[in-house]
């Protein structure tokens, strides 16, 4: 599960145009609102036309599913329902959507049987799959990630999905709540004398009995939130252009020095606690000796939306100030 998760998330999306503004005639303010038509420009520059706010929606990736749920739209189809319930607990499903298959390879027959008004995908989904989905229903693609402005991209994605579902007012409240949570967390850390404290967030997995570590640089969503909280990213390695992720091993941690080291594990695997417990290099690290290694609660999706990031803020602030 863990290795599969890493492989899927590390795939970089192709460079695409930023999500454009949509137009609604007339504007809708809730999922129950009606409109003559809605025309949106998605992240690939394609025009997406809807008869009105979409109510029967399929989500092919967990971050867009989180956006739908947080906006009050219960998706009729979700990729890897079980995985979503495990890795993204900030916006739990309140209905029983149909599992449409994996996030990288949805079942076209299953999606077609749902007769959705709209399919929301990300730019990580293969173009061949998107082409097939467009034969079933309108497809709205949002950019999966953007290292140059992860928080801005997260909000753009929420806004675009909100326009398509007639939930723009709710989207505004969600963004305001996220901003307020960051402001509150920043103040709490500053009051605790932690402003500017260096932090290194990572995840890891085991392959061929070796622990591989994935740094979340300043270009990652987690990295961007940490910096918004007034923390300083300790990683000096360069991340990819989309997710802001890099790769290293336990020896690559020796240059971090005195930092807060944070990660999110899973019930199935915790390589930092289990596999590195007897590793001499790991035990020699300053942050291990000083016990500033923080395993944050499970179920916070590192590539999610505002609700996941609010949960992350609560978790990291609590861990650093305990």
Image: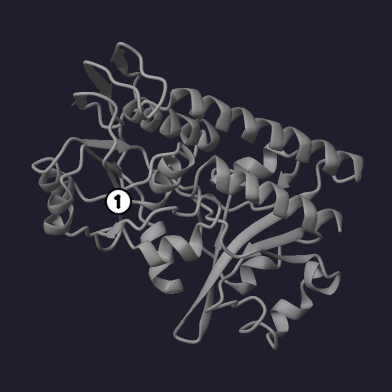
- Rendered location of residue 244, percent (x, y): 50, 47
- Rendered location of residue 213, percent (x, y): 55, 68
Residue at (56% x, 72% y) in the render: 266
Residue at (39% x, 44% y) in the render: 64
Q: Which residue is the extreme one toward the left?
A: 135
- Rendered location of residue 300, percent (x, y): 57, 57
Q: Horizontally, is 63 left or right of 218 in the view?
A: left
- Rendered location of residue 272, percent (x, y): 64, 75
Closest to the observer, 177 or 245? 177
Residue position marked by numbered label 1 in the rendering: 60
Q: Which residue is the extreme one toward the front?
A: 32
Closest to the observer, 140 or 193? 140
Q: Horizontally, is 15 left or right of 71 in the view?
A: left
For mark 1, give the secondary structure. Answer: loop
Q: Quadrant of residue 29?
A: top left
Closest to the observer, 182 or 67? 67
User: From the viewer's perspective, is residue 71 above or below residue 129?
Assistant: above
Residue at (64% x, 63% y) in the render: 263
Quadrant holding the N terminus: bottom left
Q: Horizontally, is 50 left or right of 23 in the view?
A: left
Quadrant holding the C terminus: bottom right
Q: Residues within 10 Å of mark 1 (few under 14, many from 20)?
A: many
Q: Which residue is the extreme one toward the top?
A: 26
Give the color scheme: rainbow, by chain, secondary structure or one colour.
one colour
User: From the viewer's perspective, is residue 261 above or below residue 57?
Assistant: below
User: From the viewer's perspective, is residue 46 above or below residue 122?
Assistant: above
User: From the viewer's perspective, is residue 44 above or below residue 196?
Assistant: above
Q: Quadrant of residue 241?
A: top left
Residue at (65% x, 63% y) in the render: 297
Q: Horizontally, is 245 left or right of 138 in the view?
A: right
């Amino acid at each position: 599960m863990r290795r599969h998760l890493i492989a899927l998330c590390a795939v970089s999306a192709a460079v695409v145009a930023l999500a454009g503004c949509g137009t609604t005639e007339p504007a809708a303010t809730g999922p129950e609102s009606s409109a003559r038509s809605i025309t949106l420009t998605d992240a690939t520059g394609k025009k997406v036309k809807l008869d009105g706010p979409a109510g029967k929606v399929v989500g092919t990736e967990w971050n867009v599913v989180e956006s739908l749920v947080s906006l009050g739209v219960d998706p009729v189809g979700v990729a890897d329902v079980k995985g979503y319930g495990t890795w993204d607990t900030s916006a739990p499903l309140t209905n029983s959507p149909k599992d449409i298959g994996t996030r990288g390879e949805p079942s076209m027959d299953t999606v077609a049987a749902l007769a959705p008004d709209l399919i929301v995908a990300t730019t990580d989904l293969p173009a061949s799959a998107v082409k097939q989905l467009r034969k079933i229903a309108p497809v709205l693609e949002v950019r999966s990630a953007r290292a140059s402005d992860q928080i801005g991209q997260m909000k753009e994605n929420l806004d675009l999905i909100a326009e398509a579902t007639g939930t723009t007012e709710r989207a505004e409240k969600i963004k305001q709540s996220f901003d307020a949570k960051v402001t509150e967390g920043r103040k709490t850390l500053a009051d605790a004398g932690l402003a500017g404290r260096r932090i290194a967030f990572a995840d890891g997995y085991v392959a061929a009995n070796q622990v591989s570590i994935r740094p979340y640089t300043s270009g990652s969503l987690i990295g961007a939130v940490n910096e918004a909280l007034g923390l300083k990213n300790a990683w000096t390695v360069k991340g990819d252009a989309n997710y802001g992720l890099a790769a290293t091993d336990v020896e690559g941690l020796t240059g971090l020095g005195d930092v807060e080291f944070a990660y999110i594990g899973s019930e199935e695997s915790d390589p930092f606690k289990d596999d590195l417990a007897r590793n001499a290099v790991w035990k020699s690290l300053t942050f291990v000796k000083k016990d500033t290694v923080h395993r944050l609660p499970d179920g916070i999706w590192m590539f999610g939306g505002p609700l996941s990031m609010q949960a992350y803020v609560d978790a990291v602030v609590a861990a650093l100030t305990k």
